[in-house]
Image (tube, rainbow, N blue to C red):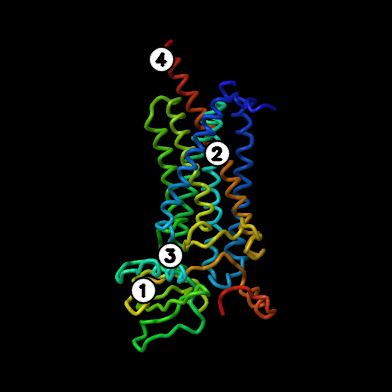
Amino acid sequence: MTRKQRRLYIVGGFMLIFASAAALVLMAFEENIVFFYSPSELAQKSEQQPIPPGRRLRIGGLVEEGSVQRDADGVTITFRVTDTVEVLPVRFRGLLPDLFREGQGIVAEGTLAMNGTFVATEVLAKHDETYMPKEVAEALKKAGQWQGDDE
Amino acid sequence: MSMHYFANPTRFNRLAGRIQPWAGGLAAILLVVGLYMALFEVPADYQQGDTVRIMFVHVPSAWMAMFCYSFLAVASAVALIWKHPLADLAAKASAPIGAGFTFLALVTGSIWGKPMWGTWWVWDARLTSVLILFFLYLGYMALWQSIEDGQKAAKAAAVLALVGAVNVPIIKFSVDWWNTLHQPASVMRMDGPAIHPSMLWPLLIMALAFQVYFVALLLARMRMELNLRRIRALRLAERSS
């Protein structure tokens, strides 16, 4: 074996070992790397172990169609977040991002109240990876080819 | 032509000097065309409106941030294993360029995130792993500076570059492996691009512009480094005579 070959095997072996170590660490910390829970994951988690009220966490999903209601004070809003399986009612007082609308993906940070409502202190909008001009979106809707998540 | 054909610095210098102005000129033309299309020709997005135009700088920057690091890692491996005299040079020269692209991706992403997501920054897997990439570039550059002996510095920096290479697939797949605020890939995905062609083409032109700009900058930096080494060698020879 030449010296070049030996160096190649050393570097290759080192990379393999290091990559496996990194993979193990990431798998071990998966719970902490996940940015939010879907309503289903939240239901599953609270089934295993009830989530104490006051524990801060993030939930994410789609704003359910027809679920958005504004209170009389104009700044409090309630809506339901769904992942098409489980549904979670959310209450939020504050400014919403421009992209917030029914059918839109959102991530909310806050706490779970005793009555099962999620009281959010921050609501962020999440958008998908699809980009297209308005006219194309209109045409797709007209043709009944729409696969997007809004309207 | 063997890998060691351009190991001769004079030969490399001559060829690089000939390519560099062409690469720089091509990058400038592509950048002007791409930016014009992105700012004036591309239609507004059905959801994001005119804010989508940030994509034409943000996405190519992010791609280049990852490409430069992959280049840096491969060059480092070639330097460690085959001891090619230009590999260290190429690795060292690409680091500040990659750091610049990463910075641009982070800043434009932040400017895009505020109006669309409602926040400048979140600690989700994609954003955090790109921030780590930025620190890897800075650490790599600092390591070169902190070790005086050039050969030792090259070896230590190359090892750091290879260790950091695990971060590149983590960045790429972070949006698939974990729940993130950042959306999944739009262009490089299994089912083909999810971007309308009227937006995709300008994006690809901008990506090509950034790529060619990288080549021009890389050659310029490598030639500068070669000249610096020659000056240093000449000074040493002068002093000893």
Q: Which mark, residue A120?
A: 1
Asked whether, in this view, residue A70 is left or right of residue B186, the answer is left
**Which residue type carries mark 4?**
Arg
Which mark is nearer the camera, 4 or 2? 2
Disc 4 target residue: B239
Asked whether, in this view, residue B138 is left or right of residue B71, the answer is left
Asked whether, in this view, residue A112 is left or right of residue B186, the answer is left
| Residue B49 place in picture, x, y as percent | 54, 71
Which mark is nearer the camera, 2 or 3? 3
> Which structural element holds mark 2?
helix
- The CA span between labels 3 and 1 is 13 Å
Which mark is nearer the camera, 3 or 4? 3
| Vertical order, A112 against B224 (above or below) | below
Asked whether, in this view, residue A13 is left or right of residue B120, the answer is right
Disc 3 target residue: A36
Q: Is there one chain holding both mark 2 and mark 3?
A: no
**Which residue type carries mark 3?**
Phe
- The CA span between labels 2 and 3 is 40 Å
> Which structural element holds mark 1?
strand
**Occupied quadrant, residue B3:** top right
**Disc 1 residue crowd, few under 14, some 14–19, many 20+, Cα 10 Å:** many
Q: Is there one chain holding both mark 4 and mark 2?
A: yes
**Which residue type carries mark 2?**
Leu
- Specify the subunit that label 2 lies on: B
Residue that sits furthest to the top in the current view: B241
Which mark is nearer the camera, 3 or 1? 3
Disc 2 target residue: B218
